[in-house]
Image: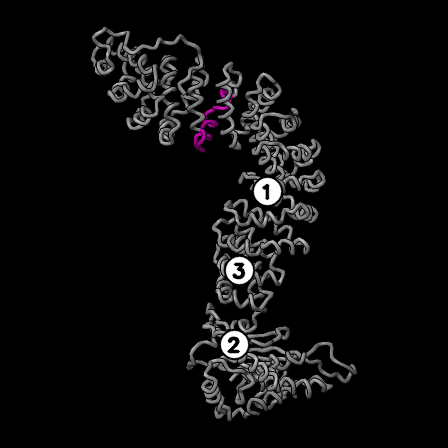
Amino acid sequence: MGKKVKKEGETPCKETFEPLPVESKTPATVVLLLSSPEEDILIKACEAIHTFAEKGDENRVSLLGLGALEPLCQLITHNNKLVKRNAFMALGIMATNGDVKNALKKLDVIPSIIDKLSLEEEVVVHEFATLCLASLSVDFVSKVQIFDNNGLPPLIQLLSSPDPDVKKNSLEIIFNLVQDHQSRLAVHELGGIPPLLELLNSDFPVIQHLVLKTLQSVTIDKDTCNTFREEHGVEKLMDILNNTNFSDLHAEVFQVVANCVSDTESFHLIHNSGGLTKLMEFASTPNTPEIQSIVVKCIAKVAQSPENHKLLHELNVEKVLVELLTVADVSVKTTTCQAMSFHTASKDSYRDLGAIPAVVQLLHNESFVLREAATQALSSLTHGNQLNSFAVYEAGGHEILVQQLCESCPGMVANSAATLGNMAGQEVIRCSILSHGAIQALVQPLKSTNTHVLVNTTQCLAMLACDMEARAELKSAGGLQPLVNLLQSYHKDVLHNACLAINVCASDAVTTVEMCKFGALEMLQEINQSVNRRSNYSKLAMISLLNANLSVKYSLTGRLASTDIISAGFYDAGKAQAGQRILALEELSKQPVNQHRPIIVVNTAVVNTEAKRRKKDDKQKDETETRPQSPIEKPWKMMDDVSLQRLVKEAKEFILPLSDEREQYAALARLVSEAMGGAVEMEKLHEFPWVLHLSELKFQLQSNVIPIGSISRGIYCHRALLFKCLVDCIGMSCTLERGEYNRAWNEVLLFTENASSHGRSSQPCRYIVDLMHQPGRLLTANTPAAEQYQTI
């Protein structure tokens, strides 16, 4: 930092002060003289300290310890020009030491230094004042102080100083300041771009390098980039690139070009002046890895705009990038993969040029950064492209990608999941991905706090979980709970993809029950009540969960459609309140007998005959006697329902053969009524002992769960459930709808005979089936009779 641009004669290295009399040669004495009232002594003392400090860091630290800093900070504002000049020279040299710099920050000297940057001051003062600020400006607090004390305007003025050291130091300070947004904007607003561009013509490479580094920072801003273009900055960059004598500047020039290509007008200027061709030349010519990496970054920036893809294709960018995948340098291969990720228009070209096996090979590299970039490239190349997905599969990429799901790098995990999700649309690939343990590997990423990881992991899971074995594996691997937990996310894409994955997993009753156990339904209810969080995805997930778990659907919605087919394991737990968790049948079965209404369960599973059961029981008894007793609790088993089986058999034998559909429903209604206590007059309904009967059943079974076939005194809700069960078992059709106060009914759809048309009417009619008062009577829906049946 203290290195001078212009050449000067060096002061001989000596251990003592020469300019002072012999009696004042010790550093301590000279420091004391800084407090002298005599200007001549001050001039010589400051000069002596400057000479002593120039000899090395050890001397600067020594002067700090002797207390030279505070008096020097005061002397830089002295009225005597020589005192002021020499004090600045001494302070500037001392400030290049880290300890001195730290001490200076505590003295609030920055305003005094900035005050001496005016054009009226001597060049020497400018040189050492800027040298001092250059040392301080690497610190964030000092940068803020320089900015707040209006340091930028005089510094920009000093860029036009006749002294190269002043220019260099001013550039260093400005470069340090423009790392912050407010200073970048201020340099543009204060007219800093023209003097910066002028310094590109400097004879000193150090100044040219600093200018380019500063331009790299400030041209990030759009308005600054416009001014840079208007001041012919693009042309100046192209001139440097075309000049082989400036090869040492090319890397930094390309850094600025990378910013410029984001601006449409600047890009056209670059292209029209042969800049794109020059990019390709630098990329394809063996060069330093640094330049190749930067050039590829420029290409990546160009490729981010779809309108540039055709130009890049005409320049054979695909061939250039594919060749760079095989160079030795990791950074070049990394930036190449990143460039390919943006250049999405050439997915097929990259495949034809053999890029995909080359990128897959990079997944084995030790560099995390390169592997992350490679997965990013594969994610982009396989997105919406089946042929590329198959190429990755043929190269064995899916196996490595599954392994990378377990890596600690979030970007690598996210990109791997995205690529696998893209590939999983093809069944043969999906099966292979699953065979390598993808479901198990996805469980941990589901618990990530990284949004990118969660979005891609849930999307991948939604693609893979369409296989029944995958859903079973997800359940056994403990993946359902973290998936359900993501319904609490307030990130739109995470929530949407979690809903999609849950929708797919709801294809199985077993996984559905498990997800409901973890609160999926309650969370989805809450989401669907929120204006900001609900979506078609959340509604779809809710519908799928309910359709796969009809017991919960009936409790929550109070209605089963004719397409909702009741099967073994269905249970009526009563009407659920909003947000209430509905327990699984096994959980309800294990509760102590209570005073609440019983849970009515349907078990249509075929019961073993007495002989088969006895043989099976004897075999189990023998096995139990021959092996040690296990302390493990026996698995829960639903109670058999022989009575229901008998009713199903009777319905199949005597009701299905009936030729008239209306008579089928009427006969089935009479069968249900007979099984549940017969017809009951409306006026005598209060005398019907169904409540006592159910209490007795609970006591006899010592359970809150009662098989529906065991009920011989049933009210509306029991008869309607039995009717729906039998209808579904024999292939007929009806709904099940819950009302208030234990009311429930079934609705059937029948075509009415029309004598004039000698056939069925074109529109079917809806009927409510009377199961309670006049069993078999069909009440036209929405009539007073039907409404009386549905209400008290």
**Circles 1 and 2: CB distance less than 8 Å?**
no
Image point 29% across, 11% down: which residue?
15
Distance CA(mark 1)–CA(mark 2): 55 Å
Label 3: how many residues lie within 10 Å, few (<14), some (14-19) or many (20+)? some
**First in sequence: mark 3 or mark 1?**
1
Position above or below: 787 against 456: below
Image point 50% across, 24% down: which residue?
193
Position above or below: 344 against 196: below
Q: Secondary structure at mark 2?
A: helix
Please tell me in which quadrant of the rendered image residue 298 appears: top right
Three-letter code, disc 2:
Thr
Whole-percent x, y for residue 736 in the image: 58, 78
Image point 48% across, 87% down: which residue?
697
Bounds of the magenta segment: 178-196
Three-letter code, disc 1:
Leu
**First in sequence: mark 3 or mark 2?**
3
Residue furthest to the front in view is: 626
Q: Is residue 164 left or right of residue 226?
A: left
**Residue matched to label 3:** 477
Q: Is residue 126 left or right of residue 359?
A: left
Three-letter code, disc 3:
Ala
Q: Is residue 316 left or right of residue 719?
A: right
Magenta span: helix, strand or loop, mainly?
helix
Q: Is residue 384 left or right of residue 220?
A: right
Pick the residue in front: 131 or 526: 131
In this rendering, does residue 70 appear at all? yes
